[in-house]
Image (cartoon, rainbow, N blue to C red):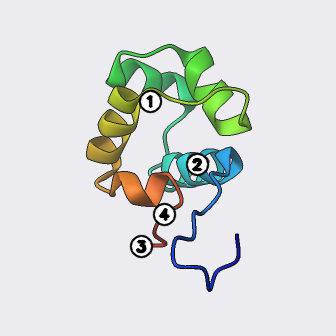
Amino acid sequence: MEKNDEYFIKEFDRNVFGERLRMLRTEKGIGQNRLAKDLAISNASISYWETGKQLPTIEAVFKLSVYFNVSADYLLGLKDD
């Protein structure tokens, strides 16, 4: 599909999610261990998400968006702000 088609579907890029998560975490000055503890998720999950090895659950995306005060759309790469 091309962008000028009526229904253009953007491809999901798991690296965008990982990069944004890492950026938000480092801007806040916290490590993976602290984030994992604050959100009651495993440290391995944070690492896997940041490296693109795994995708987060919807619940995890929700927790992260609330924690960092950003939209889920931003984390998922649908919006740039």
Q: Is residue 59 left or right of residue 26?
A: left
The dot on residue 78 is 4
Q: Earlier in the sequence, mark 2 or mark 3?
A: 2
Question: Which of 12/76 is in front?
Answer: 12
Q: Earlier in the sequence, mark 1 or mark 2?
A: 2
The dot on residue 35 is 1
**Mark 2: secondary structure:** helix
Question: Which of 49/3 is in front?
Answer: 3
Image x and y of residue 20, in percent: 57, 54
Q: Quadrant of the C terminus?
A: bottom left
Q: Is the C-beta separation of discs 3 and 1 under 8 Å?
A: no
The Cα atoms of the two marked residues, 4 and 1, are separated by 23 Å
Query: Residue at image x 54%, y 46%?
Result: 21
Q: Which residue is mark 2?
A: 17
**Mark 3: secondary structure:** loop
Q: Nearer the viewer, mark 4 or mark 1?
A: 4
The Cα atoms of the two marked residues, 2 and 3, are separated by 13 Å
The dot on residue 81 is 3
**Mark 4: secondary structure:** loop
Q: Nearer the viewer, mark 3 or mark 1?
A: 3
Above or below residue 19? Residue 10 is below
